[in-house]
Image (cartoon, rainbow, N blue to C red):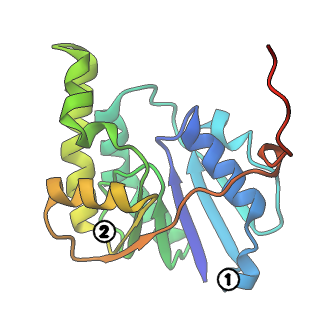
Amino acid sequence: MRLGIDASNLRRGGGVTHLIQMLGAADPPAAGFDTVVVWGADSTLAQLADRPWLVKHAVAEFGDNLVRRALWQRSRLGPLARGEQCDLLFVPGGSFATSFKPVVVMSRNMLPFEWRELLRFGFSPQTVKMLFLRWSQSRSLQRADGVIFLTCYAQRAILRVTGPIGGALAIIPHGVEPRFRKAPRLPRP
């Protein structure tokens, strides 16, 4: 099987770190995948270690322009994934606009679904962005063939907003990198 990963909206921070760590720990042949194809920004792809099973495809830098990224997903991603003969598309960023099927989405961002936190931004461009993400991620979760949540709390909170989701649901927490597994130390004064 061939797995496609849409990393077009992962440019920095936790999303990129998660992708790097996930692919670093992955053993696709053991999971039944002979190839993993990743579409992302040059800056994201440069941080992914080269692997014999990994194919990297750069997409145009969109910056923070959600609309342009959604248009690329809608018009280009599906044909590209079909051209790569992908059997499944994984979207760790939570939003997709492609017609490609099947799609599995990971919900990693609770902020658009927490009114109290969202409203802390006041009336600002950040609030508008979060409202757009709330709409686009809700729509994506409802259309996905599978949804991965990081916690039970996230699943419950998001399902209160989206209502029932037709795809398969799973809870898969983030792993803990070995560098964080250290014996307790005496605190500094």
Q: Is residue 98 left or right of residue 10?
A: left
Please name the residue that numbered disc 2 is placed on: 144
Taking the spot 85% from the left edge, 29% from the top edge, the residue there is: 186
Tag 2: residue type?
A: Ala
Residue 104 sits above or below residue 45 on the image = below
Q: Tag 1, which secondary structure?
A: helix
Residue 45: quarter of image: top right
Q: Is residue 28 left or right of residue 163?
A: right
Q: Percent position (x, y) of residue 144?
A: 30, 68
Examine the rendering and report whether any part of residue 57 can be seen.
no
Q: Calculate the distance from the C-alpha at mark 2 to the C-alpha at mark 1.
A: 21 Å
Q: Percent position (x, y) of residue 125?
A: 24, 16
Q: Percent position (x, y) of residue 21?
A: 71, 52
Numbered-mark total: 2
Which numbered circle lies on residue 66?
Answer: none
Q: Residues within 10 Å of mark 2 (few under 14, many from 20)?
A: many
Residue 7 sits above or below residue 186 on the image = below
Q: Front-most of 180 and 188?
A: 188
Examine the rendering and report whether any part of residue 184 can be seen.
yes
Q: Residues within 10 Å of mark 1 (few under 14, many from 20)?
A: few
Q: Quadrant of the C terminus?
A: top right
Asked if the residues shown at circle 2 and circle 1 are in contact, with their CB atoms under 8 angstroms apart, the answer is: no
Residue 14: quarter of image: top right
Q: Upstream in the sequence, badge 2 or badge 1?
A: 1
Q: Tag 2, which secondary structure?
A: loop
Please name the residue that numbered disc 1 is placed on: 31
Q: Percent position (x, y) of residue 113?
A: 24, 43
Q: Quadrant of the N terminus?
A: bottom right
Taking the spot 32% from the left edge, 37% from the top edge, the residue there is: 111
Q: Front-most of 73 and 25?
A: 25
Taking the spot 49% from the left edge, 44% from the top edge, the residue there is: 8
Tag 1: residue type?
A: Ala
